[in-house]
Image (spheres, grey):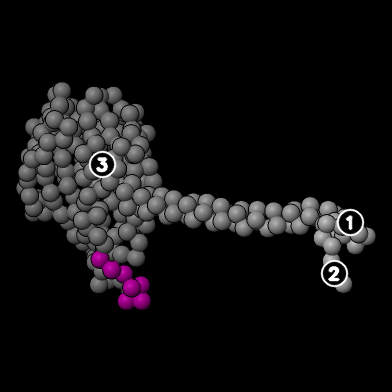
Amino acid sequence: MKIQWNKVTWYSKSLALALFVALPFIGFYFGEKYGEINGSANFFQKYNALTQASQNSTEQTSTDYYENVAAWQTDNNNTGWSIAYPIDFDINDNYSITPIDDWRQGTPGGSGLKPFTLVIPKVFEPQTNFAEATLSVGVSGDQKAIMQCLIAGSANGVTATSTATINGVIFAVIDSADAGAGNYYETTSYRTIHDGQCYTVEYTIHSGQIANYPSEYQLKPFDETKLHDVLDRIVGTFRFD
């Protein structure tokens, strides 16, 4: 049979009607599939971008935060000076106005105040022999304290004395150490005389003799450089108003 393409027949009408009815559904189907494919591609692009951003944020928090002093919390609760610190460290700036004898490490030779104390907990160096570190700010106008402010003292544990300039102010730097009952205490004290008062910004690192821990604890020596770096950065934020 010879097909006449330009002649309208009953089956050409039927075919045209079927295509007229089916084409919208076919178009809708393929449109949906394209949308799913395109949507999936966009989803995975966004997912990968968010994942990468999260990873970058986590890496920055874990590595850069303790080096980024500008992101720290600043304590301005004291008249005449301020200090900044990582917000995940515990602080106490609620202090008594009654002078105390242990306002600084060693033998202060007079009473004074300890208006700021910060504690770095053991979790900062997990699975190590690190116990904790404390940093404090002390101030005294006692004449004995002022006379002995920049003196290292005669204790056997004093290991070094030098100077450091912090925000334009020269501080004496006095290092000392003490040990006992399997514990080791290392103190670095920054001291200066300002407006007729002795100021100290000092920290003590407390660690345990690693040989005294059971072997099943699988402890390793703590990273002294890492700890000293963050403590010295905190000291470096101390400034007089």
- The residue pinned by badge 1 equals 8
Which stretch did the figure color magenta? 215-221
Height in image: 208 above or below 98?
below
Quadrant (top left, top right, bottom left, bottom right) of the C terminus: top left
Which mark, residue 2? 2
Q: CA distance from mark 2 to mark 1?
A: 14 Å
Callout 2, which amino acid?
Answer: Lys
Q: Secondary structure at mark 3?
A: helix
**13 and 63: which is toward the camera:** 13
Q: Residue at x 33, y 33 (%)?
A: 75
Quadrant (top left, top right, bottom left, bottom right) of the N terminus: bottom right
Q: Residue at x 12, y 36 (%)?
A: 165
Q: Residues within 10 Å of mark 3 (few under 14, many from 20)?
A: many
Disc 2 or 1, which lies upstream in sequence?
2
Q: Secondary structure at mark 1?
A: loop
Height in image: 142 above or below 84?
above
**21 and 34: which is toward the camera:** 21
Picture coordinates of residue 31 (x, y %)?
69, 53
Disc 2 or 3, which lies upstream in sequence?
2
Picture coordinates of residue 28 (x, y %)?
75, 53
- The residue pinned by badge 3 equals 234
Disc 3 or 1, which lies upstream in sequence?
1
